[in-house]
Amino acid sequence: MNSIFFRALFCACCFVTLLVSCDADLTSVEEVGEDWINNGTKVYYIDTLTVETSTYKFDSLAITGVSQYIMGSYTDPVLGGIKATPYLELYTTDFDIDEDAVFDSIALILDYTNYYYNDTLSRQKYNVYEVLEEITQDDDDNYYYNTTDFDLGTTSLGTADFLPTPIREDSIHYTLNNSFGQAIFDDIQDNIINNVDELTEKYKGIAIVSDDNNTAVLGISTGSKLRFFYTIPDEDIVEEGDESYFDMTFNSANSFHSITQTSINSNLTSLDDQAEEVSSKVTDNTSYIQAGSGLATRIDIPYIESVNSIKGSGAIMDANLKISIKHNTDTDNLSIRDSLNVYIIDQFNDTSYQLIDYTGSVVYGIQTDDEVGLNNGYITYVIPIKYFLDLKLNEVNADNLFLGITSQGYNDSVDRYILEGEDAENDDTKTTLELNYALYDDDYEY
C-alpha cells in the first residue's frame, strides 16, 4: 500500500511540474479517489486554468416574434441609460360600423405582462405618436431589430402620466386625442377604408415614447389594443353610461420594440463593432450582460491544450465554469434570473450555436443553491462545459472558439448582470474553471 501511495504522490508531482511548464498557471492540482488509484486510473482536480472574461456588444438583436413588447426608460447606475419604444401596426378584421353610430372617444389599453424593471414607485410619463412610415421589415432577412426605428409625427396623440401597478392591476388605460380616433372611425364608417391594406396605407401605426426622466421599463402584452367608443342615437341603453365599442389590435407580424442606450458606461464606449471586446481587467475586474442593448460576456480559456502535455492517455471527465454576480448588484429593482444562456462564438463574436452537452441537451448557466451558505452569500452560476473544452482540444481552429453568455429574455427585456472577472479580489467569486482529468494510461516509468 505504501508503494502505491508513493507512486501516486510521485505521479502527482510530475503532473504539477508538467503543467507549470505550460503557458497556463496550473499550480493547484489534486489527485482524488483512492478507488481510482487502486484500479490504475488517476483523477486530478484542477481549478487554476486561466480564464479570461470580457464584454462585447451585438450590432443588433432580432426582435420579430417576441412574447411581449417593452416600453419605458431608466438610468442604470452602472451601465447608463436605456430606452424601449414599441412601434405598433394597426390591425382589424371588422370594417363594419353602423351608419348611425356617433364616435365618442378612443382609448389605448395596454395589458401588463407582469414584467417590470427598476423603480415602479415613481410616476411614469409616456407620449403616443403616429408613425409616418410604413412599418416594414428589412428586405434582406425579414426581421425587425432593436436598432430599427421609423419617423414619427411631431404632435402627441395623447399623454399618460401614471404610477405603474403591473402586479396589482391588469392594464394601463388612457384616452387619446379624439381627432385621431374620429378620423379612423369616419374613414371606416364612410367606406374609405374597407380592409387592412387600406388601413395601414393611411394609418401606419403608433409608437409609445417614454419620457427621458422615467425610472422603469414595463412589459405590455401583444394582445393590447385601441378601443373606439361610440353611441347610436335612440338606441335602447341597458344602463346609464353604457357605450358600444369596437377594438383595433396590433399586427404582431409588424409590431416590435426598439431598444437604445441613451448613455453608456465610459469603459464600454469603444464597443461600436461586434468584433471588439473590452477585457475585465480594464473594467474593474467586471464583465457585463444587458438584455435589449446587446451587451454580453465573453469567456476564453486560452491554455486548455496544456492538458495534452500530460504523458499517457487521459480525458476530461467533467468541467464546470463558475461565474458570480458582483456583490450587492442584484436588488429588488434590478433583479436577475436563475439561469443564463450560453453560446459558442467565434473570434468575431458571431454566434455559432447554443452550447449543448453530449446528449444533445441545451446547456444553461444555473444559479447555485446557497441555502447552506456554500457560496458565502454570493450568487454564482455554474456552466458545465466539458463538450466545449473537448471541441477546443480537437478542433483545428480551436483558438477561435469562445463562449458567449447572455440573459434569458434577451430580446424582450432589459435585465442586466454585473459579473465578477477572473481577477476578483475575493477567491469565492473569481470566474473559475474547475475540471476533473482522468489519466488512465500512464506512460511514465518509475
Image (cartoon, rainbow, N blue to C red):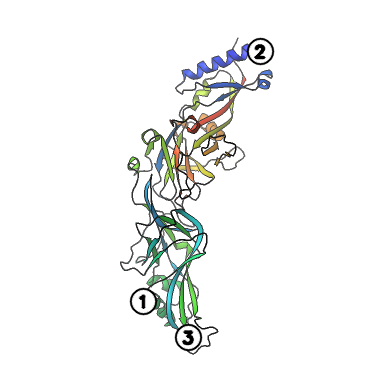
> Viewer-proximal residue, 213 or 147?
213
How many marks overall? Answer: 3
Report the residue marked by disc 3: 232
Question: Mark 3 to mark 2: distance in Å?
Answer: 97 Å
State the residue at coordinates (62%, 39%): 359
Mark 1 near mark 2, Cβ–Cβ under 8 Å?
no
Which quarter of the picture shows residue 318? top right
Residue 399 screen position, x and y as percent = 45, 31
N-terminal-most mark, 1 or 2: 2
Looking at the image, residue 165 lies above or below residue 118: below
Residue 4 screen position, x and y as percent = 66, 13
Tag 2: amino acid: Ile
Nearer the observer: mark 3 or 2; the answer is 3
State the residue at coordinates (55%, 41%): 367
Determine the residue located farthest toward the left in the rendered image.
154
Q: Quadrant of the C terminus?
A: top right
Which quarter of the picture shows residue 202? bottom left
N-terminal-most mark, 3 or 2: 2
Looking at the image, residue 83 lies above or below residue 53: below
Report the residue marked by disc 1: 179
Q: Secondary structure at mark 1?
A: helix
State the residue at coordinates (57%, 16%): 12
Tag 1: amino acid: Ser
Report the residue marked by disc 2: 4
